[in-house]
Image (cartoon, coloured by chain):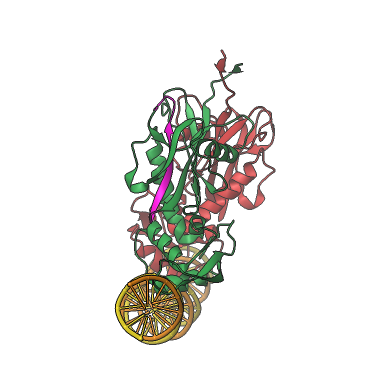
Chain colours: A green, B red, C yellow, D orange
Amino acid sequence: MTYTYEYPHPAVTTDVAVFTLREQQLQLLLICRRHDPHKGKWALPGGFLEIDEDLEECAKRELKEETGVSDLYLEQLFTLGRPNRDPRERVISVTYYALAPANKLTVNAGSDAAEADWFPLSQLPELAFDHAEIIRRAQERLAAKALYSTIAFQLMPETFTLSELQSVYEILRNESLDKRNFRKWILSLNQLEEVGGKQRNGNHRPAKIYRALNPNHVEIIR
Amino acid sequence: MTYTYEYPHPAVTTDVAVFTLREQQLQLLLICRRHDPHKGKWALPGGFLEIDEDLEECAKRELKEETGVSDLYLEQLFTLGRPNRDPRERVISVTYYALAPANKLTVNAGSDAAEADWFPLSQLPELAFDHAEIIRRAQERLAAKALYSTIAFQLMPETFTLSELQSVYEILRNESLDKRNFRKWILSLNQLEEVGGKQRNGNHRPAKIYRALNPNHVEIIR
DNA sequence: TTACTAAGTGTCAATTTTACACTATATGCG
DNA sequence: CGCATATAGTGTAAAATTGACACTTAGTAA
């Protein structure tokens, strides 16, 4: 079956940069391409838009198909469509970024990808297409948004300690923060609630456990 | 001539929300559609992407063709592609917003539009497609960006007084500002330079004239 | 019981933001 | 020519916010 148009049409894809925190680092989910072009290179999960699905649906579907990952915070990033960015045909790519709670995701390679794996941002392999630019801009956006919204909560598991949360902010902002000032600030947002007490790394005082009041909504603050 | 693909392809368009300041109001450039669908309704300037032009080029070309307007600050907004948003075929729209210096633009209707005109944001006519949503989001972005960048300068003519600039900020932020505090703040950014002295509305002291130091670049501040 | 280690907590200084009112200098008119 | 008018232009002090800083608490483990 073929599809015919009076004027030439570009193909439309979505690509998703999925971030998570592992080993105290921001890591990114990549798939290894099973087909040409760029066969064998690592790339962002993504693929062609189906003709009757919404853009965001497409991003979620491709992510699920290629990596087994679903139910993430997802936000549109920007759209990129330089002629010749894909050797096959004109491709417009609508990019998204997504955040996954720390260590909560099992990744499974799907049909279109030979392999899916996490990479620390500081040790990315060579990337297919212009995916390096997409990643750079996604990281910029994430760092910026951490300053004026509760987006960082999307990287947390359901419950967490304030020290763990502080560590996430330190990684996103790439600087160390004062413990007392951080706690004053984060609690003053009224976006957290206490739930119980637990112990962590052995021989010391256990930390109180908190949860986000609105775990499914990113609040704009200040 | 026709174009054939193995899989269905959506059409891709760009749409541009052009803002300017006229009569102490934020106004928006609309065209009246000459063809169906929505013939006779007002819409954002925009149109189909040509197969070998970049997205931003397309936005600029359509703007020029339909309204005669060119050389504006242009920034991508977001991409929208709900199935059935256009009755003809699946259409993905990459939206932009643009800013025009006050009262400096002559608008000329082009071939695809019966008419092009400015509308105060508070008095928009009924709009074609989902263009009302695009406008709402463009205005949100503009208001937000005025707080942390020099984007407002893009609404100014080459030279202007501080009172005029303050008035622009007051319109964008929809609140009145203290004159002394505004001047302290805007001058502390080191983004303006003085050029000479002029008089405005007759019988009073004339204001100093300023110009943006980097009129072609939007600086991120604070 | 003691040593260890991260959790948890408050105050003061520095900086930033906000509130606020008068003088200066041009035009236009009598 | 001088006086009325109207916007341009200017500084300071209080309030709010941000940033720096160190010790006590409460568990675990040996």
Q: Give the range drawn in magenta.
A: A23-39
- When the figure is inspected, residue B189 is found, relative to residue D22, above or below; the finding is above
Q: Where is residue A195 in the image (x, y as percent from the top left)?
A: 57, 70
Asked whether residue A36 is drawn in magenta, I would say yes
Asked whether residue B147 is drawn in magenta, I would say no
Q: Position of residue B67 (x, y in %)?
A: 54, 35
Q: Tell whether B88 sits left or right of A107.
A: right
Q: Tell whether B47 sits left or right of A32.
A: right
Q: Quadrant of the N terminus of chain A?
A: top right
- When the figure is inspected, residue B106 is found, relative to residue B151, above or below; the finding is above
Please report the residue visible at 34 percent of the width from the left and 50 percent of the height from the top: B214
Q: Where is residue B17 in the image (x, y as percent from the top left)?
A: 55, 43
The residue most toward the top is: B1
Number of marks: 0
Q: Tell whether B40 sits left or right of B92.
A: right
For the question of whether residue B37 can be seen, the reply is yes
In the image shown, does B124 or A7 lie closer to the viewer? A7
In the image shown, does D8 or D15 lie closer to the viewer? D15
Q: Where is residue A81 in the image (x, y as percent from the top left)?
A: 46, 32
Please report the residue visible at 47 percent of the width from the left and 23 percent of the height from the top: A89
